[in-house]
Image: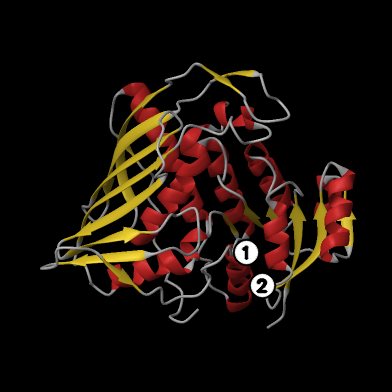
Amino acid sequence: MKKINVGVVGCGNISGIYLTNLTGMFADTVNVTAVCDLIPERALEAQKKYGIPKAYFTDEEIMADDEIELIVNITTPDQHCPVNLMALQAGKHAYCEKPLAICREDGEKQVSLAREKGLLLGGAPDTFLGGGIQTCRKLIDDGWIGDVVAVNASMRCHGHESWHPGPAFYYQKGGGPMFDMGPYYLTCLVNLVGAVESVMAYTRITFPQRLITSQPLRGTLVDVEVPTHIAGLMKFENGAIGTLTTTFDVYDDHQACVEVFGSRGSILVPDPNGFGGQVKLLREGQSVYEDVPVVYGYRENSRGIGVADMCAALREGRTPRANCAQTFHVLDLMCAFHESAACGKEIALRKGFARQPALSLGM
């Protein structure tokens, strides 16, 4: 199979695992031909470390490279929309880090342009393609827990100011626990259960200011602009009812929780922020959960599998699994949680998302 020529925009912290995997684990379908960063030293360092032919220092330069077929956009969230639009306007497919955008309107612009141009658009998170969640998907699809009745998910921590070197963003527009961590949980849930029909939610800001205790900004006070505790209900199209909490306001040593409850059993899903993890199953008539073998690969940090699947989809003429219908549905969900809390009403979701086929068994 011919490889797809890929250009990576953004050489910050997360670029390391992307470039490691795209030039290693997924090199049979992905050919990284260029990297780009507005800080030249970053681009040059990545070029040298990963043996990439070309380095660019402006978005315009990499978009003008006719060899590149697909742009992998791992810039900051506020730049996801403009960089994706540049790529699509240049006739290139686009895959970006989460979220697709920081507002619904920017997501709609991207989806509309991709369809107009006949180009693929999609993005992270791709942890739903990891061995842990794919094993859960198989259990549900094969009827091990019957019909899905309910789901419960929560992401709980006290924020990022105690460890992150630049945590201010997490408390500004486009940040907060919903836009930061919500994509992992929501992408997991819609892949296991299906599309969400409507949402109701409450939000709050518990701490109007945050004191940074990490270096190099230790002692800096950050004003909180976005809700830092979000709790809500989801009504899925198949009738299941879900609860979701994302928070930076609590102290807890058990950050991740995803549970799927069916008419004949229940599943404890591993942390959706990772690719592997332990799957547990409780079946009708049992009194305790039992460990289930993870039957799929990609159990370690396989970030970039979504890019590889998009490249394979291009050659096979199919829809990629981490496609724009999914990334937009997740964006629509996150916006709906905030809007429901603001207006005190149930918010209906846009139609159009359908789960793609699971990975083949053994992958």
What label does residue 307 carry, if any? Answer: 1
Name which residue lies at 45% across and 55% down: 272
Classify mark 2: helix, strand or loop: loop
Residue 173, can we see it?
no
Q: Disc 2 marks which residue?
A: 26
Q: Which amino acid does label 1 sit on?
A: Val
Classify mark 1: helix, strand or loop: helix
Residue 347 pos. (x, y %):
32, 35
Q: Which amino acid does label 2 sit on?
A: Phe
Residue that protrudes farthest toward the left in the picture: 285
Q: Are marks 1 and 2 in contact (CB under 8 Å)?
A: yes
Q: In which quarter of the image is residue 277?
A: bottom left
Quarter of the N terminus within the rendering: bottom right
Residue 100 pos. (x, y %):
56, 46
Which mark is nearer the camera, 1 or 2?
2
Name which residue lies at 49% across and 66% down: 130
